[in-house]
Amino acid sequence: MLDLSYETPKPKVIAGAKHDWELVIGLEVHAQVASKAKLFSGASTKFGAEPNSNVAFVDAAMPGMLPVINEFCVEQAVRTGLGLKAQINLKSAFDRKNYFYPDLPQGYQISQLYHPIVGEGEVLVDMEPGIARLVRIERIHIEQDAGKSIHDMDPNMSFVDLNRTGVALMEIVSRPDIRGPEEAAAYVTKLRQILRYLGTCDGNMQNGNLRADVNVSICLPGQYEKYQETGDFSHLGTRCEIKNMNSMRFIQAAIDYEARRQIAIVEAGGTVDQETRLYDPDKGETRSMRSKEEAHDYRYFPDPDLLPLEIEQAWVDEIAASLPELPDAKKARFVTEFGLSEYDASVLTADTANASYFEEVANGTDGKLAANWVINELFGRLKKEDHSIEDSPVSPAQLAGIIKLIQKGDISGKIAKDLFEIVYTEGGDPARIVEDRGMKQVTDTGAIEAAVDEIIAANPAQVEKAKANPKLAGWFVGQVMKATGGKANPKAVNEIVAAKLGQ
Ligand code: ADP
Ligand code: MG
């Protein structure tokens, strides 16, 4: 049912360089699992709590404490995998990634290096209507988040807040299939949209609930295709990884900077070092943080406190059966069922709240008209007051009521806007308001004719001019509309005016 015929965008080429360098980008997205409790403890994950108030003994790594897996977090990872059309591994296992950091009391992070729970999947990234790129997902593993070090509260001391310690993350690793800064942002946007539809991550980047490590390299035209054919990474350039990006704008700016930096090095005869870099938003540049660490630096080994994770196909099937309709499918359905343009369908399916609001309006009214009113009038009005669709003063039933009045010919588009404003500010049943306030469109041609006659009689000079120049008939139409308080049916007025002027 889903139409996946689309054009793939050309890779982004950086202008101003000696060669036509192309960009190659792969993202590791850390998505905080939407769950009330942490991955291995019952402590709350609530954001913004008093520092160190959501910490179980196991999170603080007290001696003798043992981790107990939170089944719901596993379910969320499986749901995410299914939503990304990925392979679900019935057997996965947890490993310890050992390193020292003050906000990591265990001295290791529990992660899944060798046997992740989710294997290969894909994300269709929409660039513009009809143009999209398929980005392959390499894997998704579950791991613990670390705590937070706070350096700006005291000039002489640093503080540690363990509230985030042990919160479940999904690390979603893409293949290096992204070819430009805009695509990287579009990929994160689409991924976030899918996670939100699934309810597996709230996608709040400001709170750090979704952050990305961005891997960037450059190559000459043709090299990427060779990598695609062979799967051999040596056709690609050396990559740098920009850590912990939590804004779409910064992701794009950092990629752009990084590409230019690497091109300058290579064109001057140098080589790019594989390293981890940090983006400084104030300076708009990336800085080296450390040279690339290798897996063996972390002394990964299977966590002896945790059994391998085994799940049953029947459970996976149950989760699969409970998946909601996802963005691509919803968008395709909106196009076919309601006759919307692909653009309007994307706007309306950006999130589920918008989509279900629209659907309620469109059921029983004309789909295109409904889309117009929701996107142009309602969204515009809500935006003005910083309202979200959830607290819209106009309910779907009320908006549908307004649209039905237009469809029936009871009110003109112009009066409908006035009516919308009344419903928005005062509430009420649209049909009732139109009745009570005499806003009904005059379609009675007798009444319109009378109004036209009156204006013609009062303006003989204008009539002469209009007879010589038919374009001036518009003036009469305007006068009639004015005289009838905008309630005359514009089509009827046009016809009658033309007839009376002998046109
Ligand atoms: P590591 O585990 O060392 O971080 P991976 O091989 O898992 O390395 O890759 C991490 C990320 O880097 C993936 O998203 C991958 O797509 C991306 N990546 C790998 N090679 C390149 C490259 N040459 N250019 C850009 N991104 C790359
Ligand atoms: Mg990595």
Image (cartoon, rainbow, N blue to C red):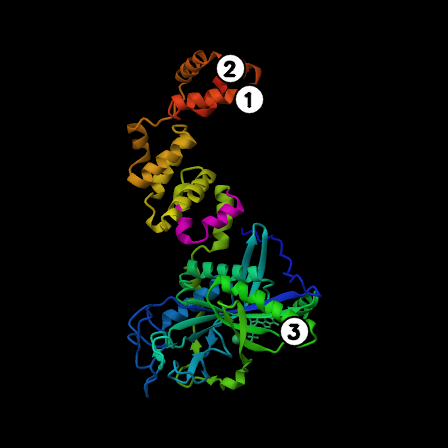
The answer to which of marks 3 and 1 sits earlier in the sequence is 3
**Relative side of 225 to 402, left or right:** right
Q: x%, y% of residue 372?
A: 46, 40
Q: Which residue is mark 2?
A: 499
Q: Is residue 238 above or below residue 331?
A: below
Q: Nearer the viewer, mark 1 or mark 2?
A: 1
Q: x%, y% of residue 405?
A: 38, 32
Disc 2 beta carbon < 8 A from ligand 1?
no
Q: Can the viewer see residue 302?
A: yes
Determine the secondary structure under disc 2.
Answer: helix
Q: CA distance from mark 3 to mark 1?
A: 66 Å
Three-letter amino acid code at disc 1?
A: Lys
- Depth check, front residue: 282 or 189: 282
Query: Callout 1: few (<14), some (14-19), or many (20+) C-alpha neighbours within 10 Å?
Result: few
When asked about the image quadrant of residue 320, the answer is: bottom left
**Relative side of 96 to 7, left or right:** left
Who's the residue at 49% across and 86% down the image? 299
Q: Nearer the viewer, mark 2 or mark 3?
A: 3
Magenta residues (range): 340-357
The answer to which of marks 2 and 3 sits earlier in the sequence is 3
Q: x%, y% of residue 336?
A: 51, 44
Q: Report the magenta stretch's main SS.
A: helix
Q: Which residue is mark 1?
A: 471
Three-letter amino acid code at disc 3?
A: Ile
Three-letter amino acid code at disc 2?
A: Ala
Query: Callout 3: few (<14), some (14-19), or many (20+) C-alpha neighbours within 10 Å?
Result: few
- Depth check, front residue: 173 or 313: 173
Residue 265 bears which disc, if any?
3
